[in-house]
Image: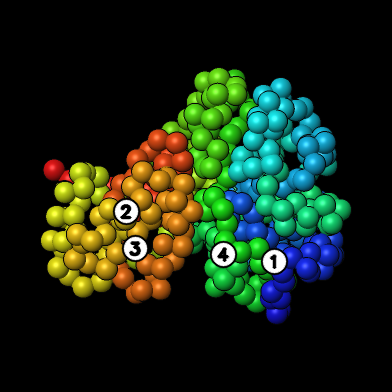
Amino acid sequence: MVTRILTEKDAAQAAKIIKNGGLVAMPTETVYGLGADAFNKKAVADIFKAKGRPMDNPLIVHIAKIEDLKLLVSDIPEKAIALASAFWPGPLTMVMPKADGVPDEVSAGLDTVAVRYPSHPLAETLILLSGTLIAAPSANLSGSPSPTEAKHVLNDLNGRIDAVLDGGSCEVGLESTVISLVGDRPRLLRPGGVTVEEIEGVIGKIDIDPAVLDRLKQGEKAASPGMKYKHYAPKASVVILKGSDEQYIRYVNDRKAGGVCAICYDEDAERLNVPFFSLGAKNDASAQAKNLFSVLRSVDDSGMKIAYAHCPDINGVGLAVYNRLIRAAGFEVTHLA
Ligand code: AMP
Ligand code: MG
């Protein structure tokens, strides 16, 4: 298969590929998604094959009209309406009771479905022109960092998908916030661009799933199946260092072996004696979110073997940065004394 590179002017062609059961990687404000017709079982199964994604990890369905929720959700919770009014279109995914028409392939056999209304204009156009709804996980090979540029998609999936719709680099840079609205209390399953603080401002206190901040304990069941897999990982070993700026810089500069680099903040950069990749300014979590995945890919392009990452602040969008970084690090955190 030859993967075609399409742009905005080719949106109708991309929509036709979706309609005909093909796979198109589309830009969204979070990361690039690998899209297929959510109601075409074969096309949905092809997404799993192209990515090498475990079949028990469900997909998010993307809509471009709020009224299409009723095609997917059997019983729309009141809190979903409040959250949709506040944050859609945008980087928020809601898990709700699944309507009968949604193929089991999409929900990986669960009786719930995850839905998002993305704000990227090209994603919106593609969904509307396709005349269906689009199931899309991130457009990377399973396990590798999510793609925030069309070239990242091609690095992973060239020859495995029909087309990539190039819409430039993604604004948020990390996958959507995922919240489940099916239990007694809303529960954050994955942090993202819409923060806990913002959600609580609309629907009150929510629970944070333990897997957001920690490794799942042996035998524990993942509320969000995606959270049990190693994810976002470059080939280099990533180690998170927790400590003051001084401690971080001293520790990294003491590592004399070759192949060592730093994933740091702008403020650390000039004092480091090893090659570094900056995530942005220390107090700018949005910049860190936007840059994280391309930094992880750059670490690999540089051939470095170990990357020491300076632990981010976990407030606001920082929680999402930390959540991705600890998975990239296989939960390897060193506390600097
Ligand atoms: P990706 O699009 O690759 O970021 O993956 C989608 C994420 O949403 C994964 O972490 C899934 O486990 C999660 N997800 C999708 N559908 C559901 C669902 N019905 N219940 C819980 N989590 C879900
Ligand atoms: Mg993914």
Q: Is residue 239 above or below residue 152?
A: above
Residue 299: x percent and y percent? 37, 67
- Disc 2 from disc 1: Cα separation: 32 Å
Query: Of callouts 3 and 2, which one flags the residue occurring earlier in the amino acid sequence?
Result: 2
Circle 3 sits on which residue? 277
* Amino acid residing under circle 3: Phe
Task: Give the mark nearest the N terminus, 3 or 1.
Answer: 1
- Determine the CA span between mark 3 and mark 1: 28 Å
Image point 20% across, 44% down: which residue?
244
Q: Is mark 1 within 8 Å of ligand 1?
A: no
Residue at 40 percent across and 73 percent down: it is 301
Q: Secondary structure at mark 2?
A: loop
Question: Foreground residue, 188 or 280?
Answer: 280
Separation of disc 1 and disc 4 at Cα? Answer: 10 Å
Camera-side residue: 321 or 221?
321
**Eye-nearest disc, 2 or 1:** 2
Element type where label 1 sits in the image? strand
Task: Tell me which numbered mark, 1 or 4, is placed earlier along the sequence.
Answer: 4
Q: CA distance from mark 3 to mark 2?
A: 8 Å
Question: What residue does disc 4 label?
Answer: 149
Q: Name the amino acid, label 4.
A: Glu
The residue that label 1 is drawn on is 165
For label 3, the crowd category at 10 Å Cα-Cα, with few meaning under 14, some 14 to 19 and many 20 or more, is: many
Q: Is residue 314 left or right of residue 260?
A: right
**Are the residues tagged 2 and 1 within 8 Å (C-beta)?**
no
Q: Amino acid at mark 1?
A: Leu
Mark 2: give few (<14), some (14-19) or many (20+) Cα within 10 Å: many
